Structure formats: C-alpha cells, structure tokens
Image: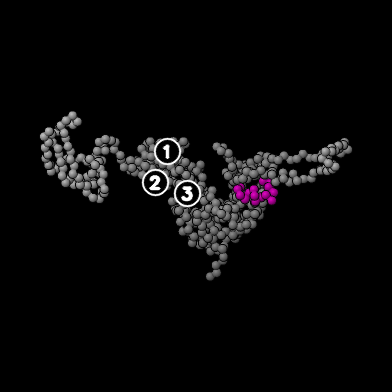
Amino acid sequence: MDRRKRTIGTPVWKPVCTQASSLEEPVVKDVGVESEIGSQMQDVNESMIEVKDATVSPKALEDDIEDEASKENPVLSAAKHSLSVEVGASVIQFVRGKDGSTKEKIEKETGVQIILPSSKQEDAIIIEGTSAVSVAKASKEIQHIINEAVKNPSLDYSHFVSLPLAIHPELVAKLFNFQNSILGISDANAGENLEGNSNGDGSEGDAQDEHLDKGSAVAVELKVANDMESVKVDVRGIPLVSYAPKEPKDSKSSSLSDLRIEKSIFIKPKTFHLTVLMLKLWNKERVNLATEVLKSISPKVMDALDNRPLFVRLKGLDCMRGSLDKARVVYAPVEEIGSENRLSRACQVIIDAFVEAGLVLERDIRHEFKLHATVMNAKHRKRRKNQKVKSDFFNACGIFKQFGSEEWGEYLIREAHLSQRFKYDENGYYHCCASIPFPENMQVD
C-alpha cells in the first residue's frame, strides 16, 4: 500500500501523553499519528501527519487536559467560600436549634453548609458556601440568633465582677459551720461532705446513724469445755428491757426535704464573694475586652477608694427574692466600715466602664446596684435530667430564726476579679480572668 508523508507547520495539538519528568522544563515530543487503510481503521486521506520539534508549555498541557476532562464531565466545580464565626460554646445550642432545626433552616435558605464544633473546647462555627454573598447572609442570620439568645433568660451569665471574701479563712470556717448546722452534719465530717462539692449527694443522716450504732449493748459470754458441748440458758429470769425505737435513718433528710433545703443550694464557702456586676461574655473576643476594661480602670478605682484600705462588716441575713417561707436567694448584707461610700463609688466606676464598653445587657443596666454576699440560692439546686422547675424556692424561716442576727465579722477587701462561672482555680475560688488590687496599706505623703 502506498504511504505518503507530509510536514505541517501548525498542527492541531491533542495530548497523547501527560507524563513529564518535570513541569519546570518544556515538554518536547516527536508525535506521529498513523492511519492505515484496512479493516481496523477508516482511511483518512491515506495520510500520516508528523509533528516535528513541537514545543508545548506546561500551562498549555494542563489547560488541554482540563478541556478534555470537562468534555467527559460537564459538571462545573465552583470555588468555595469559607468563614469562621467565633460564637462561644454557650450559644451554639441556639444556632443548632431543637434536633438541628435552626441550623438546617439557615442552610436551606442560604445554600451554605454550617459546621458546628465537635467539642465544648471549640467555640467557632464554620460557614462554607459557593458564593461570598450566601456566606455573608448566613453569618448575618447566625449573629441575629446570638443577639436574641443573649437576651434570653435561659442563657445563664458566664462571668461576673467579684470582690473575693473567701481569702479570709475565718470567714470560710463560719460558713462551713452555718451549713453544717442547718444540714445536721457533724463537725468531724463537715469538710468531707461540704468542702469538695456543695452540690454533693451524701446522706445527711449518716453521721448521726454512726453515733447511734456505737451506743451501749448487752453481751452474754458463755464458756464451754469444748466445741461439741451445748449450753442451755433459761431466759425466764432475764428482765425485759424496753428501748425507745431508733430514729429513722432519713428523718433529718425528710425534714429538710419538706423545707426544700439541700446541700446544692448553699454557696461553696471557698467561693464566697461580693457580687458587683453580672456579665454574659459568650466568646473570647468579649472576654478579652472585659479583661482590658477592668485593668484599664485600676487607677480610677484606687482614686475612688482614696488610696486607703477598705473594710466591710457582714451581719445577719436578708432575703432578696420571695418571702421567708418561699425564699429564692438568701444573702448577708454588707456594710462599709466608716460609712464614707468609698466602696459604692469604686463599684460604680467599674459598672460605668463595662456599660460604656457595651458589655452589660440593657436590662441589667436598669437594675439598682445592691452589693451583696449570697449564702443560699435555689437556682443552684441539683435536678434530675430533663426535670424542670418553673418557680424554685425553699423555706428559710428556721434559718432566719437561728442566724438572722449572725455576726459574720469584719474583713478587708483586697482586690476585684473578673471571675468565670462554673470554672475554678486550685484554691477553690472561681477562675480569675483578670484582677485589680485594692489598697491594703495606708499611704503616707
């Protein structure tokens, strides 16, 4: 068969090999495409096209490969846009919604994918979408949900500004005695039952039961010559003695249960403090801002205190919410020694700074400032899973009768803390995010 060859200067390039030793070097190939007349191939002008010394850049090669791939698969892949939104672990539940309903609603409306954190240690939400517009829209929706969630009473306060009182061991000891006396716990077991966790679930009557078990008993000693012999005892001559029935093990618990009093509603003595301001700081950005605000006002606080030590007196008890028979919060009133209002001025400096920084909720701004040291709070009551109590309270009438005029003592205020709730340092006090000192010594000009 006659075969002819011709050389063309500008061939139509179609890659037949995608391998190269290096993309940094141009790919040079002598490529021959041969056609034969026969049963195997259709005759194409009975010709063979030969390309000599054709130089192809890596970019051109890659483009041609992509073109071929697109012909086989016409689905176009759009570039992804991603955004990380730091929201804080406490508000993620609101973004998720019941059974993931809120998250799914946002995804359906905006066409994005929302990736929630897999652990409580993470506090950022990832939003992924095919356009920047859809991602921005989803981010705006999430921010709206967070703003509404923060106003919701179901979202608890995460931080607060405190004046620690638990730094005084004698006051901590008095608080332990106060709790033990109400709960009926003996001094020997007081630290074991209350120190570790004020929300403990040990039985209040165990100590009393142990004491009763060690009471007097009657013993009869019988001696025999060997183990094979038996002894007969005539019980007719033994006088009958009547004993008072043993007090039921849970009698004390039943009495406390009727009053709705249990360990969990007592404030842990090692966290005892004065509350200046409650805060909802739901992400790291707001925590960092609160830290900076507190540190920045240290000179102003010192000025408000006239650079002199400040002592307070704690005396008696008072009920903040509800009546004595349906108390919710019981606290020890605070009185500044000297009655110069230096403490009130210092606390107002702190409050004003946090309000100005936008860290205080609007409804909290309207609340009247009342410095207090909480000793019992029904809101801290331990509940079973899925148990909800709309209006929790306890009967404090007996407590006020016994401790209503209690002299707790006089104590120096040494510092102010930005404290994190539900997290504790090694000393047992709330985790300190930041602190500023109060004067401890008189300054002499």
Residue at the outermost front position: 1
- Does the CB distance between marks 3 and 1 fall below 8 Å? no
Q: Is residue 150 above or below residue 436?
A: above
Residue 67, visible in the rendered structure: yes
Please name whichever residue, 32 or 186, is drawn nearer the observer in this view of the structure. 32
Residue range in magenta is: 183-198
Which residue matches tag 2? 84
Q: Position of residue 112 (x, y in %)?
A: 37, 39
Report the amino acid beneath label 3.
Answer: Leu
Asked if residue 2 lies left or right of residue 383, the reply is left
Residue at image point 84% right, 38% down? 229
Upstream in the sequence, badge 2 or badge 1?
A: 2
Asked if residue 40 lies left or right of residue 100, the reply is left
Distance from the alpha carbon under mark 3 to that under mark 1? 22 Å
Quadrant of residue 212 in the image? Answer: top right
Upstream in the sequence, badge 2 or badge 3?
A: 2
- How many numbered circles does the render carry? 3
* Label number found at residue 281: 3
